[in-house]
Image (cartoon, rainbow, N blue to C red):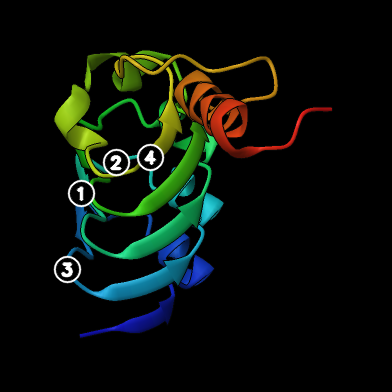
Amino acid sequence: MFVGEISSFVGQRNSLRGLNLSHNSFSGQIPESIGNLTLLEWLDLSSNKLNGQIPHKLADLTFLAFLNLSDNRLTGPIPQGRQFNTFENASYHGNIGLCGFPLARGCNADGGTSTKRHMIAADCNKFCPER
């Protein structure tokens, strides 16, 4: 099992067609350099401890036919465009901080999930002192 951050060095392997780093204990953010893998057809980073936003540069991978980012700690809006518009909910399952298409959770103007903000407000209405 691998731990630590995914090295940005992986983005220098231009001839890669597939990358499977699933079921490890990688933490930190998805390296933006993965967006340099222009021939990449499948990417599986599922079941790790990755956090932060999905790099927008990944939406430029025109050959990407399979994506699995499920069961991480990713947050923010899902990038839109090209291949990213073809991936379904299962690609993002288990990342409660993600929002936007194809998920039912919409994003607020600040990029957060509207569901999360609603839950915080509901909890405060019950348990917070009046202001």
The answer to whether residue 104 is above or below residue 79 is above
- The residue located at (39%, 47%) in the rendering is 37
Q: Quick one: quadrant of the C terminus? A: top right
Report which residue position mark 2 lands on: 39
Name the side, left or right, on which 50 lies relative to 116. Answer: left
| Callout 2 crowding tier (Cα within 10 Å): few <14, some 14–19, many ≥20 | some
Q: Residue 23's mark?
A: 3
Report which residue position mark 1 lands on: 17
Report which residue position mark 4 lands on: 38
The image position of residue 118, as x and y in percent, is 52, 21
Image quadrant in which you'd find residue 84:
top left
Q: Which label's residue is closer to the chain start, 3 or 1?
A: 1
Amino acid at the residue labelled 1: Arg
Amino acid at the residue labelled 4: Thr
Name the side, left or right, on which 60 lies relative to 109. Answer: left
The image position of residue 124, as x and y in percent, is 61, 33
- C-alpha gap between disc 4 and disc 2: 4 Å
Q: Which label's residue is closer to the chain start, 3 or 2?
A: 3
Q: Which label's residue is closer to the chain start, 1 or 4?
A: 1
| Callout 4 crowding tier (Cα within 10 Å): few <14, some 14–19, many ≥20 | some
Q: Which label's residue is closer to the chain start, 3 or 4?
A: 3
Amino acid at the residue labelled 2: Leu
The reply to whether dot 4 and dot 2 touch (C-beta < 8 Å) is yes
Q: Which label's residue is closer to the chain start, 1 or 2?
A: 1
Name the side, left or right, on which 20 lies relative to 32. Answer: left
| Callout 1 crowding tier (Cα within 10 Å): few <14, some 14–19, many ≥20 | some
Residue 30 in view: no
Please state the total of marks drawn on the protein image.
4
